[in-house]
Image: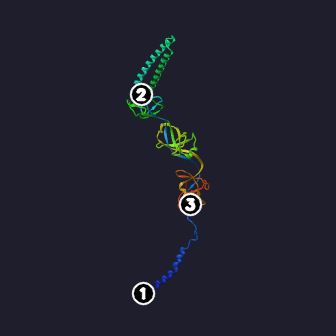
């Protein structure tokens, strides 16, 4: 019993001492550090972008269609059998060159018969003239023979024209396409024999929205790219449709350019850029610097080591940048591009890297 009492007395002393000193220690450790101050914030490291005036092209993007300078489907004017083919597919042919020869045997025979009739009519008319001079025939008989001769000559002209039509010729100089018929085939005016393209120049057709139609003029330059071809091409607008299309509310323009090397192929698409204005003093910022709000946009501008939340108005956009059109920021200002979600207005920041 005494042993138990002796052990309990030291434990009671320790508990009492703990109740006295532990609360004081806790209170001391919870006391704020007077050197830091209760309102001091830690600097946040950010990246910055220094603004400068740049050239901004305000342009329209459009999908265009490349066309040949001249193109045609080659057809026969008359229904005949083909008797000759006088070109190689995919080669250059000159204007007026014979491409196909159609059968003309019956027309040639018809022409010979008409020429015989012409000579007979000329002889009769000559004799009739002698008779009328001697007063042995009437003027009416002479006029009938003269009209008959003129009719024969008219028929000869028609036959010669028909014979000419049996020669199918190139309407212009260019590249001949693939032929769709063979020697001996019977063709009609509905049969497409082959095609031709003049690709010394090419045309680019494209459309612009109705609201831009008064911003362009003839002679204006466009630029375009073609998939699969390196570099950029330039063409000049020379014509346009006389009215806006009802369905699309757009206007079709046509530009032309030299096709050096024949590398631009009709039928391919062109990615057209049409410049409508140029701003030489545009202020551009990276899109990641923008902070969207319910009404408008804001950015953090670094001033005197602090991030100032600044409302801005935006203009044109590019793939990675946006134009600032408000006047509350200017060239030389630095906007925050990283850690935007961690900072608040007037927060101290440290710009680690700039554009």
- On the image, numbered disc 2 is attached to which residue? 101
Residue 107 in the image: state x and y as whole percent: 42, 24
- On the image, numbered disc 1 is attached to which residue? 4
**Do the residues bearing badges 2 and 1 touch, measured as CB atoms within 8 Å?**
no
Counting residues from the start of the chain, the first of labels 3 and 2 encountered is: 2
- The Cα atoms of the two marked residues, 3 and 2, are separated by 85 Å
Display colour scheme:
rainbow
Circle 3 SS class = strand
- On the image, numbered disc 3 is attached to which residue? 350
Q: Determine the image quadrant of residue 354.
A: bottom right
Q: Is residue 186 visible?
A: yes
Image quadrant in which the C terminus is located: bottom right
- Residue extending furthest right? 327
Q: Mark 2, residues whose alpha carbon is within 10 Å: few (<14), some, or many (≥20)?
A: many
| Residue at 54 percent of width and 75 percent of height | 28
Mark 1 or 3: the one toward you: 3
Residue 291 in the image: state x and y as whole percent: 55, 58
């Amino acid at each position: 019993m005494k042993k138990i009492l002796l052990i309990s007395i030291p434990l009671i002393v320790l508990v009492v001492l703990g109740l006295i000193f532990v609360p004081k220690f806790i209170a001391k450790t919870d006391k704020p550090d007077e050197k830091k101050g209760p309102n001091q914030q830690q600097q946040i490291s950010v990246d910055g972008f220094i603004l400068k005036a740049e050239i901004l092209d305000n342009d329209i993007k459009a999908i265009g269609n490349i066309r040949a300078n001249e193109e045609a489907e080659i057809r026969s004017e008359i229904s005949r059998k083909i008797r000759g083919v006088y070109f190689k597919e995919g080669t250059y042919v000159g204007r007026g060159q014979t491409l196909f020869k159609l059968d003309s045997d019956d027309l040639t025979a018809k022409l010979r018969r008409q020429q015989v009739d012409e000579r007979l009519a000329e002889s009769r008319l000559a004799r009739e003239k002698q008779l009328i001079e001697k007063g042995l025939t009437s003027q009416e008989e002479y006029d009938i023979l003269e009209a008959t001769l003129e009719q024969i000559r008219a028929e000869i002209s028609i036959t010669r024209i028909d014979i000419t039509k049996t020669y199918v010729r190139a309407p212009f100089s260019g590249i001949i396409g693939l032929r769709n018929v063979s020697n001996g085939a019977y063709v009609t005016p509905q049969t497409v024999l082959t095609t031709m393209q003049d690709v010394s120049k090419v045309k680019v057709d494209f459309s612009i929205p109705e609201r831009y139609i008064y911003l362009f003029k003839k002679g204006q330059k466009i630029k375009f790219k073609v998939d699969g071809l390196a570099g950029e091409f330039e063409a000049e607008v020379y014509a346009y449709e006389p009215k806006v299309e009802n369905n699309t509310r757009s206007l079709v323009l046509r530009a032309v350019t030299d096709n050096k090397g024949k590398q631009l192929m009709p039928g391919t698409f062109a990615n057209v850029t049409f410049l409508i204005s140029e701003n030489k003093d545009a202020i551009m910022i990276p899109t990641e610097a923008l902070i969207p709000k319910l009404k408008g946009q804001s950015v953090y501008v670094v001033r005197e080591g602090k991030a100032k939340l600044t409302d801005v108005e935006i203009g044109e956009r590019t793939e990675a940048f946006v134009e600032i059109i408000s006047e509350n920021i200017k060239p030389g200002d630095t906007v925050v591009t990283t850690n935007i979600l961690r900072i608040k207005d007037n927060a101290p920041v440290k710009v680690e890297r700039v554009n």
